[in-house]
Amino acid sequence: MDLDLDERTRQFRDEVASWLAANVPDKPMDSFDSAAGFAQHREWEAQLADARLSAVSWPEEFGGRDCSLLEWVIFEEEYYAAGAPLRVNQNGIFMLAPTLFSHGTPEQRRRILPKMARSEEVWAQAWSEPEAGSDIAALRSTATRTDGGWLLSGQKTWSSRAAFADKAFGLFRSDPDSDISPAAHPPRTPPKDRHRGMTYLMFDLHADGVRVRPIEQLDGEPGFAEIFLDNVFVPDADVIGEPGGGWRVAMTTANNERGLSLRSPGRFLAAADRLLELWRRDGDPADTALASRVADAWIGARAYQLYTFGTVTRLADGGELGPESSVNKLFWSRLDVELHETALDVLGAQGELRGEWLDGWLFSLSGPIYGGTDQIQRTTVAERLLGLPRGAR
Amino acid sequence: MRFALSAQHIEFARSINGLLREAGTPAVIRAWAAGEHASGLALWRRLAEVGVTALAVPEQHGGLGADPVDLAVAFETMGYHAMPGPIVESIAVLPALLAPDDALAGRWLPGIADGSSIATVAMAPHVPYALDADVADIRLQVTDSGLAEFTPAAVPLDSVDAARRLYEVMGRRAISRRETAADAAFDHGVLACAAQLLGLGQRLLDDSVEYAKQRNQYGNPIGSYQAIKHLLADVATQLELARPLLHGAAVALAGDAATTSRDVSAAKVACGDAGYLAARTALQVHGAIGYTAEHDLGRWLTKARALRSAWGTPAFHRARVLDALMAERAS
Ligand SMILES: Cc1cc2nc3c(=O)[nH]c(=O)nc-3n(C[C@H](O)[C@H](O)[C@H](O)COP(=O)(O)OP(=O)(O)OC[C@H]3O[C@@H](n4cnc5c(N)ncnc54)[C@H](O)[C@@H]3O)c2cc1C
């Protein structure tokens, strides 16, 4: 058991660190949820891609570096330690791409990934619907068979970055008989497998029949959007996996979102580091209650880092990312809120003023909701990790 | 980098686990709490046979010279079974306290290794009392000026964990002015205590999950209700994230890293919080049956409470973490 990085990983880390030191802009960019900020972040992604640093874990042929999972975790640590911009194409690079590697065709990978690596195409995730939040299997948007492809209709919502993104991926009901929502006509008794009859598709947010309505979030920026679809044509080439087999494909995406790739330890280590700096500058050492919370924030970030090293080792040994991904998500979502709350309390009367910490706190509040709420994750941990009996949903 | 227990670690844990399960620690714990040590001492000898007591003793003194990761594995497993006795003091602390070339090491450590000797160690201010001084043949107090032997008080203090028989230190006699590795010994004690807490917590969780599957109310197993599920999921999450800190601290201690005390303290904080949450939750999940002296749950619950503030309180360890982090930034 050891925590030593090998020579290759150390060299990679040093290369990344020096590139970032030379290239990360001094001035923070505007929020990527504003029009101006979105454009700035897109440019930054192209710059990262030029250095082959936008998707380091991908194969070289798609613009990556074939990095191991460990190297990717190290990359992330350096990335956030350098204060580099948030990743505007995270839903593409960290969720759709792994899904394509598992379930996509070679043609899809060749066509989609290079443009994703440079953020020539920025992706949004379109799963949630007004009546299908936690219970995503209740979704009602449809994909209807047509010549050479599918026609999409219905409404998606809460789609992050969709206000300015180019493309989206989502789940659609392709077998109307599988609709189990209370609104189905005629009403149906839920089948044994309520996860059948759904298809995973990609579509263009600028295609005919698509209307995007941005929604302002707590910070006042249009961070997500509603998507209205009216007979939007999608060719067969943009189905991922088997028609009707979308649920299984979707679980890959979801596990990536919770498990590892979307929120790596680097983010929290960097935030804990900034909190320590804030404490050193502004903290009142006599306030031992607050000092304890500062210590806890660092302990939490370190725990998540080491836990991730354990996960990396397990996966390298051929293990799988199972229900542990829910443990992961429960931990970081809470850590993020507590860390930012602590920073605001250190800031005292300044804490209510808009700024990096306040924006970070606002965003942290959504962590226990998106990617499957904390309640849903707890149920998953209890049933799938601890083996408790299934109960009413 | 390989951050996972090796097959040997897992095999070692399994052998200790099998031995303790077979022995049935609940009866041993109850006897120990009443001052009847025979079954506990027999178990101590069994642990010595599989090498647990020899782990940290250098090879030249008949030990295994194993590293702190092995200690963490052994103590987590002993915590899982709430093994009574001065295991931290004898197995983790004393070997770390004495330089291998110290005459005292030659005198005491072979007996520790083979299980024929048992030590207790007091280290004020964090370890003010001597655990199980009545069964220990080596009774030490670590002070700023060296080592002292002592005579314990006639009767033990009352700990919340009746199996922790704590003795006040009386009649001191200095035996060595030689510098001891008091800091390293303390860190070994903290690590072992943290590992015990993690093991206690894991057992409390496992037993609660089992109970929640079997106990029916309102026509369903209580474990099918979300209120119960979510409590247990929180415990599982905290334990899962405390374990890597424990192993990380063991790796730091093994490599004598500059961050050792920071890492050991972080592990103690996290394992203490997780173990204690597991105890509170276990009682809630069991209901009144868990509140009885007859049920074994109380043995684990009271030990979790006691160990949470043994070998340094949570406040002390949090401060130590933060001080170390601030010092890192200043340099
Ligand atoms: C910032 C942000 C970004 C998002 N980005 C995207 C995106 O890009 N794409 C996308 O598709 N979606 C996105 N979402 C939507 C997100 O996935 C959903 O909000 C989430 O799945 C929860 O659904 P809901 O909001 O409808 O809440 P509901 O499902 O209505 O839940 C409301 C409350 O009830 C609880 N609850 C629900 N069911 C149960 C149950 N069975 N047991 C116990 N408690 C239950 C929940 O935990 C929650 O507390 C985003 C959300 C946020 C906040």
Image (cartoon, rainbow, N blue to C red):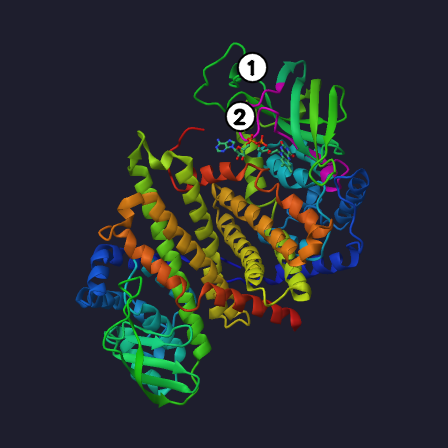
Residue A319: percent from left, percent from top: 47, 46
State the extent of the magenta-drawn residues as a range.
A115-142
Count every numbered label the image shows and give the total: 2
Identity of the residue drawn at 34% across and 51% down? B204
Magenta run includes residue A89:
no
Q: Quadrant of the C terminus of chain A?
A: top left
Q: Decide: few, some or many residues near mark 1? Use Cα within 10 Å; few <14, some 14-19, many ≥20.
A: some
Is residue B326 placed above or below A88 in the rendered structure?
below
Q: Which of the chains bears the disc numbered 1?
A: A
Identify the mark at residue B221; answer none if there is no mark. none
Q: Nearer the viewer, residue A254 or A313?
A: A254
Q: Nearer the viewer, residue A233 or B186?
A: B186
Mark 2, residue position: A137
Residue A307 vs residue B29: left or right? right
Q: Decide: few, some or many residues near mark 2? Use Cα within 10 Å; few <14, some 14-19, many ≥20.
A: many
Q: Quadrant of residue A108?
A: top right
Q: In the structure shown, which secondary structural element does the residue marked by tag 1 occupy?
A: helix
Dominant secondary structure of the residues highlighted in magenta in the image: loop
Mark 1, residue position: A176
Q: Residue furthest top?
A: A186
